[in-house]
Image (tube, rainbow, N blue to C red):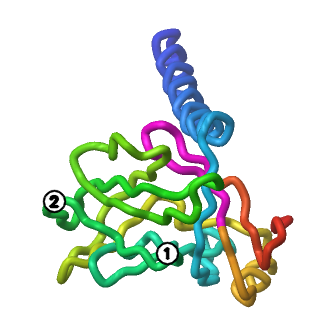
């Protein structure tokens, strides 16, 4: 192996390591610097041969539109034409304004009057009802522990959300107690 080939090989390895550390560092920065919100979920517990055991988390704010009503009875309001593949910004309650509920989803730019919003991608749009994914739909659990979450009466997720609306899961709250993996 020539010196040039060795340098190229080392450079490729270094780039891969830096890339992976960047991904981890970005998520850790969200967890350290982001604002906290608690989202209500409806869990499902699949097992995947390659990914291991994980819980699929579907959030109440995953379905938005005229017919969707949040837990405090307020309607979601869609602003503008929202189509499949669009990016949407959804105002979410913080612990201080939880009674206000989720008020707006819009495309183009984040809501300027929102204290806290989460960014998502529209996966379907039909009859003025949209389905949104936020990038926090899976939570990996130790083998054999997913059933506890699946059978729980109430599952909430405490997330941290950065200023751009990107969320990261901080912890699960199962039946009003922080779940310990």
Question: Which residue lies at the image location 43% right of the left edge and 39% below the top edge?
Answer: 164
| Residue located 63% across and 61% down the image | 38
Looking at the rendered image, the quarter that the C terminus falls into is: bottom right
Q: Residue furthest left?
A: 81
Counting residues from the start of the chain, the first of labels 1 and 2 encountered is 1
Residue 9 inside the magenta-drawn segment: no
Q: Is residue 127 left or right of residue 55?
A: left
Report the front residue among 158 and 71: 71
Q: Is residue 135 above or below residue 59?
A: above
Horizontal side of residue 32 vs 167, given as left or right: right
Name above or below for residue 160 compared with residue 152: above
Quarter occupied by residue 42: bottom right
Query: For mark 2, what is the residue?
Result: 80
Label disc, if present, on residue 79 of the rendered structure: none
Where is residue 128 drawn, in percent x and y? 20, 77
Task: Give the spatial CA distance, label 1 vs label 2.
Answer: 21 Å
Q: Position of residue 85 (x, y in %)?
A: 23, 61
Which residue is painted at 52% across and 9% down in the image? 3
Crowd tier of the residue under label 2, counting other residues whose Cα lies within 10 Å: few below 14, some 14–19, many 20 or above: few
Q: Say what secondary structure mark 2 lies in.
A: loop
Q: In the rendered structure, which segment of residues is drawn in magenta?
A: 157-168
Q: Callout 1: few (<14), some (14-19), or many (20+) C-alpha neighbours within 10 Å?
A: some
Vertical position of residue 88 compared to residue 137: above or below: above
Residue 21 x, y percent position in the rendering: 61, 32
Name the residue located 49 percent from the left edge and 75 percent from the top edge: 60
How far from the left and from the top, in percent, is residue 30?
59, 39
Location of mark 1 (residue): 60
SS at badge 1:
helix
């Amino acid at each position: 192996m020539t010196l040039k080939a060795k340098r190229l090989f080392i450079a490729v390895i270094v780039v891969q390591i830096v890339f992976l550390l960047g991904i981890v560092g970005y998520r850790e920065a969200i967890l350290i610097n982001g604002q906290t919100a608690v989202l209500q979920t409806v869990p499902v517990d699949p097992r995947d041969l390659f990914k291991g055991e994980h819980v699929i988390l579907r959030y109440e704010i995953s379905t938005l539109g005229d017919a969707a009503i949040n837990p405090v009875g307020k309607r979601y309001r869609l602003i503008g034409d929202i189509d499949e593949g669009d990016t949407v910004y959804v105002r979410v309650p913080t612990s201080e304004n939880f009674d206000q509920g989720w008020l707006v989803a819009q495309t183009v730019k984040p809501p300027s009057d929102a204290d806290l919003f989460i960014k998502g991608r529209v996966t379907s749009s039909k009859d003025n009802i949209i389905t949104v994914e936020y990038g926090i739909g899976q939570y990996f659990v130790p083998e054999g522990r997913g059933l506890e979450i699946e059978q729980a009466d109430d599952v909430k997720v405490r997330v941290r959300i950065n200023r751009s609306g990107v969320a990261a899961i901080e912890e699960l709250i199962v039946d009003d107690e922080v779940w310990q993996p």
